[in-house]
Amino acid sequence: MTTPRYRDALPQLSGRRMLTDSGLETTLIFHDGIDLPLFASFALLASADGRARLRGYFDRHAEIAVSHGIGFIADTPTWRASRDWGERLGFDAVALARLNREAVRMMFALRDRWESPATPVVVSGNIGPRGDGYAPDRMMTPEEAQDYHAQQVETFARAGVDMITVMTMTHAGEAIGIARAAKAAAVPVSMGLTVETDGRLPTGQPLGEAIQEIDGSGAAPTYYMINCAHPDHFRDVLAAGGAWRDRIRAIRANASRKSHAELDEATELDAGDPHGLGADYAGLLRLLPNLSVFGGCCGTDHRHVAAMAEACIAEAA
């Protein structure tokens, strides 16, 4: 097992602003023209060409962080690398564990290329939902979710990740289960919740209420993230206030203002306005006092992340 470098002292928890990557699957499908069944980028880890594509993507984003003199959170390309998705793609449990470990090794190598005392690189294992990332098509109890996700969490923990990043959680039950698995493995976790155009989770639960429910479960995440929604969809909810906002340290927003249903039906990329999205992030700094991690989700690419750096990080230096 590789000894984690930052597991007990994540730089972003001290208020240090850091970048992460953007819409990986968006870039691979719409910009690189790669066929990506089930949006499963982890499958590219199984071939030399696929690994080269992923390295190029992550290097491009790490370079943006380093050029601004700040750190980078390297999330593994493993959003779909859990049991049910793996089985649908022909990967058994042994193969999935091997690819999850390969993804971590790739991020360690990226850290070797880019890290310096001024630019820490935090390696994070990325976990996605068991079901649809846009809709709560499979509601799970915390117990079911912990049982399902524990294998991937434990694989990451043994591989030496600094933390785990959870993305596109649609309901509190699954989020609690993953948080419990992370607590059992003694790994910090960023819990990414997705919201609809009204700022509520796809279940209809208010964002603040969901955070309070998860925090009250006995396995509170290290911090929260909002992802896979445009700032227009949740800005008013944040502006309404509430102590729960202090728990949000990361934003990975969509480039598009479209709803999840509209994005699901879209056949063309809606990349929005990179500079406008960067300005939106700067505005969120006034609503989220602990916001310190900036990245993108659907429709975003390295241009959006560079705009975030200019708007949110360079001006704070």
Image (spheres, rainbow, N blue to C red):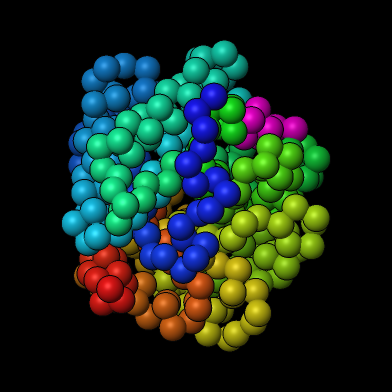
Judge whether residue 252 is colored magenta: no
64 up-or-down from 281: above or below? above
Q: Residue at x 46, y 57 (%)?
A: 11
Left or right of 219? Residue 83 is left
Q: If the image is split into quadrants, where does the N terminus sit?
A: top right
Rendering quarter of residue 69? bottom left
Q: If the image is split into quadrants, where does the C terminus sit?
A: bottom left
Left or right of 276? Residue 102 is right
Task: State whether residue 268 appears in this view.
Answer: no
Q: Nearer the viewer, residue 183 or 264?
A: 183
Task: State whether residue 21 appears in this view.
Answer: yes
Q: Which residues are magenta?
A: 147-154
In the displayed image of the protein, which residue is found farthest to the front? Answer: 117
Q: Residue at x 29, y 25 (%)?
A: 51
| Magenta stretch secondary structure, dominant | helix
118 up-or-down from 5: above or below? below
Residue 39 image point, x, y percent: 41, 35
159 up-or-down from 133: above or below? above
Q: Residue at x 65, y 55 (%)?
A: 221
111 up-or-down from 220: above or below? above
Residue 168 image point, x, y percent: 53, 51
Q: Nearer the viewer, residue 246 or 176?
A: 246
